[in-house]
Structure formats: structure tokens, C-alpha cells
């Protein structure tokens, strides 16, 4: 195995500068401006390594339990086998990206963390969006497929689920690389 230290190779460029140059070269190869692919970390190429729990997708246990017991997930989504079929389902079925279907949770009289904060205090009917998000997870998306989601032009909900997929499956240290070029995005969608 070769030692590539600057002293032995005659290269006086520090490692962090070499890494920055490699990241810049990758951005140029990905088309230069606009939405660029985040720097490759972990496994190289199109394989997208998962971060955290590889069975639960780092989802709240109540949400995951409701997804796995949902007739929509168990019957209708079970039949979808490809990335493109799931993207089409997102396009036609998703109308919001909250975890629970509107009006399906009882929060009256609850206070504190059970008072409807962020939608995970009490159960209800899990949303179509979260069922589809977990379905995407079962497909083990590639880097190219995730880029296809977050740059999709047909529906803001396809893009939103792409960003949610990144949020739940990628290392926290990589999130900025994924999200940075989209921070000024002005596309509107309903939560």
C-alpha cells in the first residue's frame, strides 16, 4: 500500500486543500452552476450510504408503527416496485407533507408534548406522504435518484419528499452539502 503523504510524494499541498479541490472538480463535472451534487462521502459513486438505523429510517416509533400497519402501505404501496412508480404515486396522491392526515388525531385537552406539537404526540392516520417516504426508503435510493427527487419540476411534493429522505437517511454533517444550493428556492407548497 502506497503512502501518499506530502513529504513522500513531493506534493506540498495540504490534505484539506486537496479535498477542497476534489470537491470543486466534482461540482464542475456535475454541471457547474445551479443544483450541484453534494460532495461524495462514505461510499463512492452512485451508492448512497444510509446513516442511523437501517430498519427504522430514524423515524419516530409511533409514525413508523402507523406506517407499517397502514392498509395503504401494506396493500397499495406493496405493489409498487420501482422508483418511477413511487414518484408517480407521489405526484398523484400527496397533498401535504405532515405526518398525520388532517383531522385524524385527537389533541383536545392535551398539554405539553402531547398537545399537538409537531404531530407526533398522539396517533392518528399516518399521511400518504410519510407512507411514500418510507416506501422510498425500502427501495434504497441511489444518489442519482435522490438528485432526481430534489430537482424534480413536476411537483413540489416530490421535491419535499426528496429533502425529507435526505434529512432522515443522511449523516447530519452532510445535510448542508445537500441543502445549500436550495436555500433560496421560492417554490411554494402547502405543509
Image (cartoon, rainbow, N blue to C red):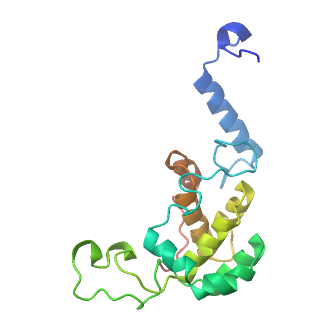
> Which residue is found at the position 71% from the left and 75% from the top?
87
- Rendering coords of residue 137 (x, y %): 64, 65
Residue 190, visible in the rendered structure? yes
Q: Which quadrant would residue 169 be assigned to in this image?
A: bottom right
> Which residue is found at the position 75% from the left and 45% from the top?
45
Residue 182, visible in the rendered structure? no
Name the one closer to the observer, 164 or 182.
164
* 30 displayed left or right of 62: right
- Quadrant of the rendering where the N terminus is positioned: top right
- Rendering coords of residue 185 (x, y %): 55, 64
Q: Count how many numbered circles sit on residues in the image.
A: 0
Q: Which quadrant would residue 143 be assigned to in this image?
A: bottom right
* 105 displayed left or right of 97: left
- Rendering coords of residue 180 (x, y %): 54, 52
* 181 displayed left or right of 59: right
> Which residue is found at the position 71% from the left and 76% from the top?
86
Name the one closer to the observer, 49 or 89.
49
Q: Is residue 96 above or below residue 139?
A: below
Farthest bottom residue in view: 103
Q: Which quadrant would residue 150 be assigned to in this image?
A: bottom right
Name the one closer to the observer, 22 or 80.
80
* 168 displayed left or right of 35: left
Amino acid at each position: 500500500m502506497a503512502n501518499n503523504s506530502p513529504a513522500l510524494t513531493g506534493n506540498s499541498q495540504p490534505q484539506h486543500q486537496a479535498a477542497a479541490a476534489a470537491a470543486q472538480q466534482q461540482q464542475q463535472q456535475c454541471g457547474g452552476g445551479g443544483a450541484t451534487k453534494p460532495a461524495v462521502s462514505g461510499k463512492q459513486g452512485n451508492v448512497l450510504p444510509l446513516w442511523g438505523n437501517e430498519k427504522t429510517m430514524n423515524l419516530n416509533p409511533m409514525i413508523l408503527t402507523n406506517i407499517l400497519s397502514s392498509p395503504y402501505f401494506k396493500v397499495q404501496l406493496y405493489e409498487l416496485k420501482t422508483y418511477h412508480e413511487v414518484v408517480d404515486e407521489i405526484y398523484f396522491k400527496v397533498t401535504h407533507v405532515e405526518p398525520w392526515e388532517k383531522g385524524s388525531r385527537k389533541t383536545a385537552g392535551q398539554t405539553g408534548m402531547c398537545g399537538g406539537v409537531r404531530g407526533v404526540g398522539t396517533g392518528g392516520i399516518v399521511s400518504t406522504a410519510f407512507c411514500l417516504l418510507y416506501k422510498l426508503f425500502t427501495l434504497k435510493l441511489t444518489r442519482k435518484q435522490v438528485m432526481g427527487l430534489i430537482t424534480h419540476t413536476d411537483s413540489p411534493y416530490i421535491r419535499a419528499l426528496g429533502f425529507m429522505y435526505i434529512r432522515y437517511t443522511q449523516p447530519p454533517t452532510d445535510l448542508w452539502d445537500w441543502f445549500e444550493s436550495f436555500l433560496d428556492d421560492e417554490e411554494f407548497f402547502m405543509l
